[in-house]
Amino acid sequence: MSSLSDALEHPAKVVSSLYRGQDIDQFPGIVAEHFRSLFKSDDAFQKIPALDVRRTPQSFPDGSLVVFNAMVQDTSLSPELYLAILNGNACGGWGITETTTTPEDVQPEHLRERSVFWAISIPGLSAWCVNGGLPDASTFQQSAQPHKFPVPNASHVGAQLKIYDNKLAQSIRVTNVMSFIGILTFEPLHANIDYPDPVNVPTLHVLFMSPLPSTIVPRAFPDSTLSTVGALRQELIRWIADEALAGDLIASEFVLLCSIARVRSRHPPILPLSMTLSGFPSPPDALSATPTLYHVLAGIFPLVALLPLSIETLNNASFYPESKEENLHSGYLQHPKGTVLLLTEGQVMEGQIFDQGVKNIHATQEMMTDQTISYMFPFSKFQFETDVNFVVTTEGTKSTFFRTDLNVPFSPTTLGNLRKALYRPREAVVFPSAEKLSQFRQLVGGSKIGHVNLGEHLGKYIEEDFVQGRLSGHQMTPSSDDLIKRMVLARLVSLSHHHVEMTIQDWESVKALERHTQSHA
């Protein structure tokens, strides 16, 4: 039986030693189970070196064992054949080759099929989720296929995945976030394998894999390690408001609630509420176009992406994945489930929207409204489910391009240079202590995965409250759609308190938030 050190230092030899004339169709499962059992403890797993922008593919010797925490970007690649049994009844695959084998020696019954995917560094991953953090912008890692990453000109790693266990392969979907453990080599890009001069790209022969939670770091709900959750929640709202929203506590609370939302049901649809923060000043200049809100959210949420909108970006970029010459290009919207996507309209000037811009706006609106995105192919398109939180900032009274579920007027309370305060760089953000920041992350992470029950008593209270509102004929009487939206918000308030059952106070606090936004509209 191979040891842990053998697997770390010579993984391909361990694979070869496992093969003793077993059924070749069952062998991929045997390999996966063996390596999974070797690294089942956290201590053992932590010994596997990570493939990332700090330790790039080129920094590893050929045949190294690595773990690649990645998002699956492309599942449309065709499977490929490989020689599963080499001369001398040795196993093939996993980067194991036999150079003395000629085409005439190949026996058809020794050929098997493996699945091929393309995976990339997790887009929008916050630095605190990565051991050692992310390198600064001066350390740039360019992938072999940069068009397959949703954020242009961003440092990242891309790799070709080869998966031998068909059952595992069938479970993989685009934007899945997973840990892939395998043997790293450099091999021809699958699409170019028959070219005279094929391009060699990082290739990971997957031994086993495991899904990552949407929170990246495992969380609990309710989190018993957090004491006085209510007070901690208020501290978090105050910190977001003071550092990123010029003291606007109401906007801060809405941003928090919309950011912890997730898809609860598709039939009937109970989807994350999208939000516009209206009346939000545009940046002071093009060099300071990133709102401080982005840095603050990235400090507490694991997946946060920024999409600065402009007429040029809308007309010239692609927001949705699109196949070009049998190669799936990514788009700004191709992000993993659980991502908070901040769209800023501060750089939108007058100009004409062309056909590509219209398509991009439509794709974004579809994702906001239905939590789906269409992948475009030459003669067809395919819809895939998403679960992304949208927060839009705009200087106008409503978004220039999008219909969002909520429109929260920005009401700053601090004086001074407002534009400068709202667009400070990350270095200027005053973060709380490491302990407090960790508690904030536990709070929002647990809220993101939690479930809230609606008791019979509260159900009757809400029903009577709705009837009384109708009978009063008050100007703010909610419609049935408003009632559904209020229910969703009340659940989010409960989640943010780590309540397992909604309370009357949660319900009333949402009504108070609504009154405040309507009075400032």
Image: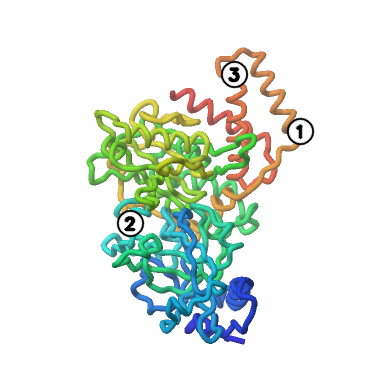
| Residue named by callout 3 | 477
> Between 46 and 359, which is closer to the camera in this rendering?
359
Vertical relation: 521 (above or below) 176: above
Q: Position of residue 482 (x, y in %)?
A: 58, 25
Front residue (pair 390, 367):
367
Neighbours of disc 3 within 10 Å: few (<14), some (14-19), many (20+): some
Whole-percent x, y for residue 65 in the image: 47, 76
Question: Of helix, strand and loop, which one carries label 2?
Answer: helix
Q: Which residue is mark 2?
A: 146
**Vertical relation: 87 (above or below) 238:** below
User: Residue 498 vs residue 177: left or right?
Assistant: right
Give me the residue at 56% from left, 38% from top. 271
Which of disc 3 and disc 1 is earlier in sequence? 1
Q: Which mark is residue 312?
A: none
Q: Residues within 10 Å of mark 1 (few under 14, many from 20)?
A: few
Establish if 172 lies above or below 315.
below
Residue type at mark 1 is: His
Question: Which one is closest to the eye, mark 1 or mark 2?
Answer: 2
Look at the picture and state if 374 lies above or below 12.
above
Q: Secondary structure at mark 3?
A: loop
Specify whether residue 307 is in view: yes
Q: In this rendering, does residue 55 appear at all?
A: no
Residue position marked by numbered label 1 in the rendering: 457
Q: Quadrant of residue 278?
A: top left
